[in-house]
Image (cartoon, rainbow, N blue to C red):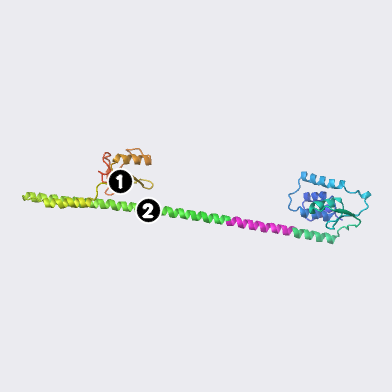
Amino acid sequence: MASDRAQLLDMGFEEARVTAALKATGNAGLQAAMDWLFAHADDPLPTETAEAEVSAAAGGGNDDAIPEEEATAASLKCDDCGRLLRDAAAAEFHAIKTQHQNFSESTQVIKPLTEEEKKIKLEQLKIKMAEKKEQKRLQEIEENKAKEKVRRTTGKEMVEIKEKLAELEMKKAADAKKREKEEDRIAKAKIKAQIELDKRDRAARMEKEKLERQGLQAPALVAPVAAAAASAAGPKEYAEARIQLRLPTGGPITHTFKSSDTLKTVYAFVSEQTGATQGTFKLATTFPRKVLDDESKTLKELGLAPSAALAVV
């Protein structure tokens, strides 16, 4: 008949585990070794140090056992559960496994397992090990599901944040475009009013010259023109000038100056914001296109109050 070691190796157990099981049970038989292997199925493979400790523990148990030549009992019995144990090593292993402490000698002989009983035990062991593996597999599946759920939730939150940021940027761009259109409208209105004013002024001068040639005076004609000019020009006293500076690259910069500030102050501001050296760029009105280079004039004198748009060229 094959030895317990050979049978355990044929069952597919690792040699290191078989060696540790036989040492731990003191070679108490196939059943005791199989019980030990099942109880320690999830333990890491024993190292040489661990095997030495197991051997020492098993040897320590045999020191208290009764030698075979002096024994009068055939087995040991656990008084806590009634189980029969082959020898002191098996009783020690049983005590470690179950925490039972009460043992007594027994004259009942433990019959060795038959081949059929061994097959049944092996099948039961395989079923239990398969159940443990299945439980571990199902646990890993649940853990992976939980991780995937967290990953998807995080990804969804990131997408929502990106969408909100994109919406905010679009809103800011739309607001900037709207302000730009409004400033252009105001500038065009001012230019249109100025053109109309110039037309009326020329018409008044021509009418005056005509009357003077005829030897007549036309004070009544000049007054309406002046009134119309005052009406078209609107209020002229502004304390501030809101200037939008359109850079060659990047978005526009809007800054509020005092209407009494000179054009030189605006040039210095652009140089500070862009890092460009003064003299390397010019400021110009957008409509009509006119370069402003008289830095001594105030923003009020240049007609840039209360607001205006200037291009940096």
- First to last magenta residue range: 129-149
Q: Which of 192 and 280 lies nearest the eye of the viewer?
A: 192
Front position among marks 2 and 1: 1
**Residue 36 coordinates in the image, percent (x, y):** 79, 53
Dot 1, how many residues are within 10 Å of its Cα: few (below 14), some (14-19), or many (20+)? Answer: many
Which residue has dot 2 on it? 175
Label 1 sits on a secondary structure element that is strand
Q: State the predominant SS element of the stretch in magenta.
A: helix
Q: Which of 79 and 300 lies nearest the eye of the viewer?
A: 79
**Residue 145 coordinates in the image, percent (x, y):** 61, 58
User: Height in image: 58 above or below 279?
Assistant: below
Residue at image point 32% right, 43% down? 257
Mark seen at residue 241:
1
Residue at image point 72% right, 57% down? 132
Say which amino acid is labelled 2: Asp
Q: Which of 286 and 81 lies nearest the eye of the viewer?
A: 81
Residue at image point 53% right, 55% down? 155
Q: Which of marks 2 and 1 is nearer the N terminus?
A: 2
Is residue 59 in the magenta section?
Answer: no
Proximity of marks 2 and 1: CB atoms separated by less than 8 Å: no
Residue at image point 69% right, 56% down? 136
The N terminus - image quarter: bottom right
Residue 32, image quadrant: bottom right
